[in-house]
Amino acid sequence: MSLADAVLVTRPEPGLAETMRTVAALGWRPIAAPGLELLPKPFTPPRAQALLLTSRAAARAVPPLGLPVLAVGEATAAEARLCGHPDVTAAEGDAEALAALVRNTLQPADGPLLLAIGEGYGRELAAALRASGFAVQRRVAYAAHAARHLPAPALEALRQGRVGAALFFSPRTARASMALIRAAGLAEAARTIRAVAISRRVTDTLAVLPWAEVATATRPDHLSMMEALGEAR
């Protein structure tokens, strides 16, 4: 195996532990380096015909409301079911697919939609659905704050040139993680690291650092991210 056997996993919980396990199963040494910290925010839900969830964090933050749930993808749907939501339908993994699922299964005349999101998210999806005639109530279910520093194991691995790859699951996480790397004076370490992005939007944010290579998952889901990472050599 190469000396650069470590993989930085920048996603926060929920999802960090799952990715760490999968990365280890591929033969890599996973290192937790979440770029964001997620904190639930209580809110009073309005009346709605359905609940829309765009992330596992939102699914975890919203208690069962007795509403049908439309989730952005299967991972979010599974989290919603685990948290007690009984009627959950999954879209194909991104906001466009979720909007299409809403248009194909719901009617604007049946009432507003409750879109539970992280602070600062969901505006484009809400706008797209409103353009299709739906009333959308956006409610912040959790707040995401940039982490204050990289964990010590991540710093050590970067300084020693032991990081072979870094995983980025959202534009915001990517920006926060890169800011932490730069603040630690380790931007040049990126020259030997392969960055793996979950989507083209994430790929577009990564130009801030001089990565050895940037790979983009073929689909915006966890399985495709792991396929893009590949097994350790």
Image (cartoon, rainbow, N blue to C red):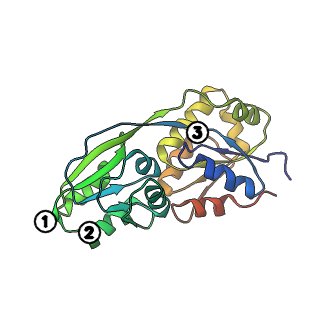
Q: Residue 155: which quarter of the image?
A: top right
Along the viewing direction, whichever of 98 and 41 lies nearer the viewer: 41
Quarter of the figure with residue 33: top right
- Kindly check if marks 2 and 3 are in contact, taking CB atoms under 8 A apart as contact: no
**Label 3 Cα neighbours within 10 Å, binned few <14 / some 14-19 / many ≥20:** many
Label drawn at residue 109: 1
- Residue annotated with mark 3: 34
Residue at the (60%, 63%) spot, across then down? 223
What amino acid type should be assigned to the residue bearing mark 1?
A: Ala
Left of 163 or right of it: where is 116? Answer: left
Identify the residue at horizontal 59%, vertical 43% (top origin). Answer: 10
Q: Quote the CA–CA distance across marks 2 and 3.
A: 34 Å
In the displayed structure, would residue 21 be above or below residue 69? above
CA distance separating discs 3 and 1:
42 Å
Q: Amino acid at mark 2?
A: Arg
Residue in view at x 57 percent, y 37 percent = 177
Taking the image as shown, residue 64 lies to the left or right of residue 16, namely left
Find the distance from the CA under tag 1 to the CA under tag 2.
12 Å
Along the line of sight, the residue nearer the viewer: 211 or 64: 64
Q: Residues within 10 Å of mark 1 (few under 14, many from 20)?
A: few
Name which of mark 2 and mark 3 comes first in the sequence.
3
62 relative to 153, above or below:
below
Is residue 131 rendered to the left or right of residue 202? left
The secondary element bearing badge 2 is classed as helix
Task: Please tell me which of labels 3 and 1 falls first in the chain.
Answer: 3
Give the position of the C terminus as an image quadrant.
bottom right
Residue 100 point in image, percent of width and height: 32, 68
Question: Sequence order check: which comes first, mark 1 or mark 2?
Answer: 2
Dot label at residue 103:
2
Element assignment for label 1: helix
Q: Nearer the viewer, mark 1 or mark 2?
A: 1
